[in-house]
Image (cartoon, helix red, strand yellow):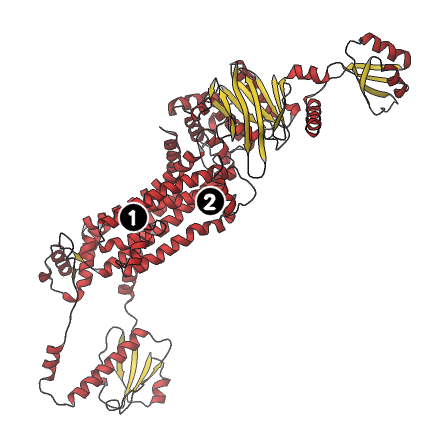
């Protein structure tokens, strides 16, 4: 086995057998599922918190049209305001004035015991407005009003199909947005967490004084490369395990969670048969589910994510390695690390704008420039961008990774023997020219 | 035959010159001392020999050919700054380093077991390094250095971190390795620690090789024909009387019994008998010895001489 191989093996085995690695690798996906499922379970178990609203309807026209639901329960009262306000068994008191039908721009008084929720407030205003509108319409005395209104009512949803693709596949920009941001966030996390790992492990070797022993057997640049590749493999192992777990969940868990009739719709969408979809109101959700439930799609996304994770990580890990070699402890690394953290954060910010408008020229350029490319590109990928853009971005990323490794190797080789003084950027740049 | 030749090696860093045109030859099968004060450039030279850093100019020849990366498999290096991976198990770690030196996993394991048995530390195999004491870690480091049976062994300040027992063990093992045919280079600023085992030395001071050669020859060259006299009497008067046969007097402090000390150099061609006769006639001679000079004295003299020549 080559010497780099031996170093890779050591780095990989040391990290993968760590308890913390095994635990986070298995727990993270479970935690994510738990985050989605637990609120639902709590909701069903505890039930909605119902607000009782005492209504003093001076107009006598509104109360009978207010509909109680699981959030709000309306109770009519003829008590005067003072005694109503004194009651402690109700959540709120609502006063409807006599002139509510005729008056314009009224502000109704809503006395709440304790904090009032925005959902409740908007529900109450909507119901009252509906009631007032209905009453006013009625005063025009139009025949068959209800039927006319029903006719007039429109309920349109957008179901987007890609025209520029070979196969007519269903897309949903809402879902793409969500997936894009998720992938970008994953990448962002991996770059920073695993990059930091490369750096701290180099600083540790330096502090342990084990480095001099290692570099007497292997070239410093080889050692650095072995370390970077070893950690990259660890990151890939983790993301692949997550990928498999998530794919399994999307393949088996989603169908189990959704009601059967929704699944029929999902199957219809997957088959490209939109006409068969019975429930147009939830089209967006059904499209989302159908996409996530299609294993091929998930694997394709994951493959690209992994590819960008790997190339992006190699690129940034090289910078992390150079910084780690230049300093004696993590504290000193802080200022130098801005070189990495700033572009990565910018990358994530651009990724969010790119997910909102994936075909803008800003999104395009940011997904080509290597510093921001990994984050921005994965945010755009779910929208289905041309293959040549992905290829160009990858090629540039790999090229700049090679360049960066060369540069980092030059710095590393000098930096690992520098103890004591914290170097400035200027000094580090000068190291590159040492023989 | 010389196993190692360093030819006109120069290495400069941004702020200082670490090595200035240094040349030296290490004969096969000897113990070679690389001596010099801290900061003289010894470690830089050792790193160049180990192919860790490259010289700005000059070259290193090992076994008759210019040094390449593959040659490091024939070199065993115990750095001054030594450490091990703290979280790794002792056995795994030793195998790791042995494999980096080109041994197969299988060979490394067999040889390691032998060494561990020899040092009676077999039960450490599965211990983590952080559980070991410093002395224990030193034994492991020594084994890692010699495991691949290198032709050339380099020890940088070998005795500085070792406790006396391990230092002794180290000395014995090194002489054993020398008997088996290995060449050993020692680097140290503590001259007395190695003079008894070194055959040849090089003194490095302020980035330059100021003195190279066989230890016995150097002793003779620097301190041959020097004698110490202890007596009761007038030291200055004696020195005047001795001028025809001796020179380079140094007057020591009188001891508790009022006896004077003089150290002197017998002139070439003068006889020792004359010297003693003159001394006997003039003072009450209490002691007469040939000076035993240490490497330390040689070093101090060599440094003074080299500095005066540089100034001139």
Q: Where is residue B5 in the image (x, y as percent from the top left)?
A: 53, 20
User: Relative to the observer, which residue lies in front, B289 or B22?
Assistant: B22
Which label belongs to residue A195? none
Q: Where is residue B9 in the image (x, y as percent from the top left)?
A: 54, 27
Tag shown at residue A393: 1
**Callout 2: 10 Å neighbours few (<14), some, many (20+)?**
many
Counting the numbered discs, the total is 2
Name the chain under label 1.
A
The residue singled out by tag 2 in the image is A323
Q: In which quarter of the image is residue A173?
A: bottom left
Quadrant in which residue B295 is drawn:
top right
On screen, B150 above or below B92? above
**Which corner quadrant of the image does residue B266 belong to?**
top right
Locate residue A339, reporting x and y percent: 44, 50
State whether residue B272 appears in this view.
Answer: yes
Q: In this view, does B128 lie above or below A75?
A: above
* Front residue of B210 and B290: B210
Q: Is mark 2 on a helix, strand or loop?
A: helix
Residue B113's place in the image compared with A193, above or below, is above
- For the C terminus of chain B, give its image quadrant: top right
Percent from the top left, x then y, of residue B96?
Answer: 42, 29
Residue placed furthest toward the front: B312
């Amino acid at each position: 086995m080559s010497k780099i191989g031996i170093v890779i093996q050591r780095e990989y085995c040391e990290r993968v057998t760590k308890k913390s690695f095994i635990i986070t690798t298995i727990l993270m996906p479970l935690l994510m599922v738990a985050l989605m499922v637990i609120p639902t379970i709590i909701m069903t178990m505890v039930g909605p918190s119902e607000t009782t609203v005492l209504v003093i309807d001076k107009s006598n026209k509104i109360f009978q049209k207010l509909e109680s639901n699981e959030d709000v329960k309306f109770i009519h009262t003829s008590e005067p305001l003072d005694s109503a306000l004194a009651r402690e068994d109700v959540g709120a008191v609502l006063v409807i004035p006599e002139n509510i039908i005729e008056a314009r721009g009224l502000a109704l008084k809503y006395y709440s015991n304790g904090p009032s929720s925005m959902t409740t407030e908007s529900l109450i205003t909507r119901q009252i407005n509906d009631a007032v509108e209905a009453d006013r319409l009625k005063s025009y005395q139009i025949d068959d009003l209800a039927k006319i209104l029903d006719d007039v009512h429109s309920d349109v949803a957008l179901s987007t199909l890609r025209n520029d693709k070979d196969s007519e596949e269903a897309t949903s920009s809402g879902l793409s947005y969500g997936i894009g941001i998720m992938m970008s966030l994953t990448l962002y996390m991996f770059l920073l967490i695993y990059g930091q790992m490369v750096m701290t492990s180099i600083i540790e070797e330096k502090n342990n004084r084990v480095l001099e022993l290692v570099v007497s057997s292997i070239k410093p640049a080889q050692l650095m490369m072995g370390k970077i590749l070893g950690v990259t493999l660890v990151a890939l192992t983790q993301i692949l395990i997550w990928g498999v777990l998530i794919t399994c969940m999307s393949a088996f868990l989603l169908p189990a969670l959704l009601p059967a009739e929704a699944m029929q719709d999902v199957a219809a969408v997957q088959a490209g048969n939109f006409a068969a979809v019975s429930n147009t109101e939830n089209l967006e959700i059904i499209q989302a589910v159908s996409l996530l439930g299609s294993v091929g799609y998930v694997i394709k996304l994951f493959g690209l994510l992994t590819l960008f994770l790997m190339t992006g990580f190699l690129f940034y890990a090289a910078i992390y390695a150079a910084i780690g070699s230049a300093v004696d402890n993590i504290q000193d690394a802080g200022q130098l690390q801005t070189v990495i953290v700033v572009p990565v954060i910018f990358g994530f910010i651009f990724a969010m704008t790119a997910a909102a408008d994936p075909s803008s020229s800003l999104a395009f350029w940011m997904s080509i420039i290597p510093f921001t490319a990994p984050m921005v590109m994965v945010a755009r990928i779910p929208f289905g961008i041309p293959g040549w853009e992905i290829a160009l971005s990858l090629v540039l990323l790999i090229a700049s990774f090679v360049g960066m490794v060369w540069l980092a190797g030059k710095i590393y080789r000098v930096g690992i023997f520098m103890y004591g003084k914290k170097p400035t950027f200027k000094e580090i740049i000068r190291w590159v020219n040492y023989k | 035959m010389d196993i190692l030749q360093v030819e006109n090696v120069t290495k400069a860093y941004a702020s200082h010159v670490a090595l200035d045109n240094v040349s030296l030859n290490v004969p096969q099968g000897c113990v070679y001392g690389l001596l010099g004060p801290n900061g003289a450039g010894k470690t830089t030279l050792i790193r160049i020999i180990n192919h860790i850093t490259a010289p700005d100019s000059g070259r290193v020849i090992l076994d008759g050919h210019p040094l390449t990366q593959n040659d490091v498999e024939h070199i065993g290096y115990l750095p001054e700054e030594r450490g091990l991976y703290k979280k790794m198990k002792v056995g795994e770690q030793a195998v790791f380093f042995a494999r980096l030196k080109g041994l197969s996993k299988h060979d490394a394991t067999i040889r390691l077991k032998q060494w561990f048995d020899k040092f009676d530390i077999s039960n450490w195999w599965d211990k983590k390094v952080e559980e070991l004491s410093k002395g224990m870690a030193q034994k492991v480091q020594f084994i890692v250095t010699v495991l691949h049976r290198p032709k050339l062994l380099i020890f940088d300040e070998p005795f500085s971190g070792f406790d006396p027992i391990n230092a002794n063990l180290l000395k014995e093992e090194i002489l054993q390795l020398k008997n088996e045919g290995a060449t050993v280079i020692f680097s140290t600023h503590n001259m007395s620690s190695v003079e008894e085992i070194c055959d040849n030395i090089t003194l490095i001071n302020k980035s330059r090789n100021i003195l190279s050669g066989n230890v016995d020859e150097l002793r003779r060259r620097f301190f041959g024909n020097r004698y110490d006299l202890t007596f009761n009497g007038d030291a200055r008067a004696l020195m005047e009387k001795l001028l025809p046969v001796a020179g380079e007097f140094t007057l020591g402090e009188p001891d508790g019994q009022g006896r004077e000390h003089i150290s002197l150099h017998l002139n070439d061609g003068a006889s020792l008998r004359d010297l003693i006769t003159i001394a006997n006639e003039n003072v009450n001679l209490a002691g007469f010895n040939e000076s035993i000079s240490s490497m330390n004295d040689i070093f101090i003299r060599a440094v003074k001489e080299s500095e005066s020549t540089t100034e001139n």
